[in-house]
Image (cartoon, rainbow, N blue to C red):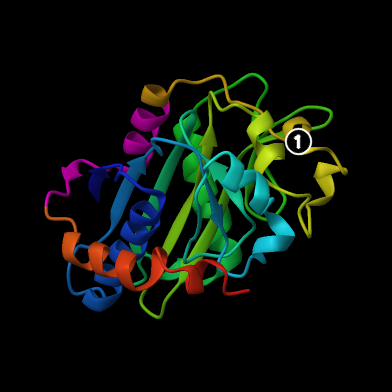
Amino acid sequence: MRLLLLTLPTAAENVALDDALLQVCEAAAGDEDTDVLRVWEALTPAVVLGRSSRLEREVDVDACRAWQIPVVRRPSGGAAVVVGPGCLMYSIILSYSRWPQLRSIDFAHRFILGKIRQAVGPSQPPVVLAGTSDLAMDGDPPRKFSGNSLRCRPHSLLYHGTLLYDFPLPLLGTCLRSPPREPEYRGGRRHDEFVGNLPRTAAQLQQGLVEAWGASDPLLDWPRGLTTQLVADKYSAEAWTAIL
């Protein structure tokens, strides 16, 4: 598997790059080795909407404007998240030709989150799979530190998510409204009560991801042109961000 350790300057560029990597994998349709692990960390805070998120329902738009926090929309599902320093991001792009079992979405969640839990390593409290696609620190109640989502195409998938390790948790309540739907284990808790920072460093998490996925081949020729085109045509466009 190829490895891309790359953070681009803006939130729009970063979500566009994930989409571009998926499009490259999809176009190859298994004829080339296009599986990629990307690890990155936003330089400044941003809100990232899910593909079907309702902007005004999930985000305090006025607060984001006041704090100059950009809002972008990603190509995958799930609810809005806040990213920034202290939140390591990972993206996995996989071809079904090499991973045919991942066509089952339930299996994809279990398999990939199992790999991410392996990357995190032994922890106290233990790390557990929670809800549909969360990782949480076990406890009474559990505290989520990783939210994840996927985008499926005919020949490939994108699976990406967050790993909180030193994130300013009150910022979640500043930017986000109460979610329109929540897993049972959340129990109505506020954002900063529901989530927590995993006791790891960014370097430890990155190394764990690289080892868990066996990503040893650096990706030098990443799709710059396609990323730039996607930013201009889609991810920086208000019509895409505010589509719902």
Residue placed at 51% from the left, 53% from the top?
111
Q: Quadrant of residue 234?
A: bottom left
Residue placed at 40% from the left, 23% from the top?
204
Q: Position of residue 215 (x, y in %)?
A: 26, 43
Would residue 242 appear left or right of 60 to someone viewing this image?
A: left
Would residue 47 appear left or right of 232 to someone viewing this image?
A: right
Amino acid type indicated by mark 1: Phe
Q: Position of residue 40 (x, y in %)?
A: 36, 40
Q: Quadrant of the C terminus?
A: bottom right
Would residue 168 appear left or right of 220 to someone viewing this image?
A: right
**Extent of the magenta region:** 205-220
Q: Position of residue 138 (x, y in %)?
A: 72, 30
Height in image: 65 above or below 109? Answer: above
Q: Residues within 10 Å of mark 1 (few under 14, many from 20)?
A: some
Judging by the rendered image, the residue that carries numbered circle 1 is: 194
Label 1 SS: helix
Residue placed at 67% from the left, 66% from the top?
54
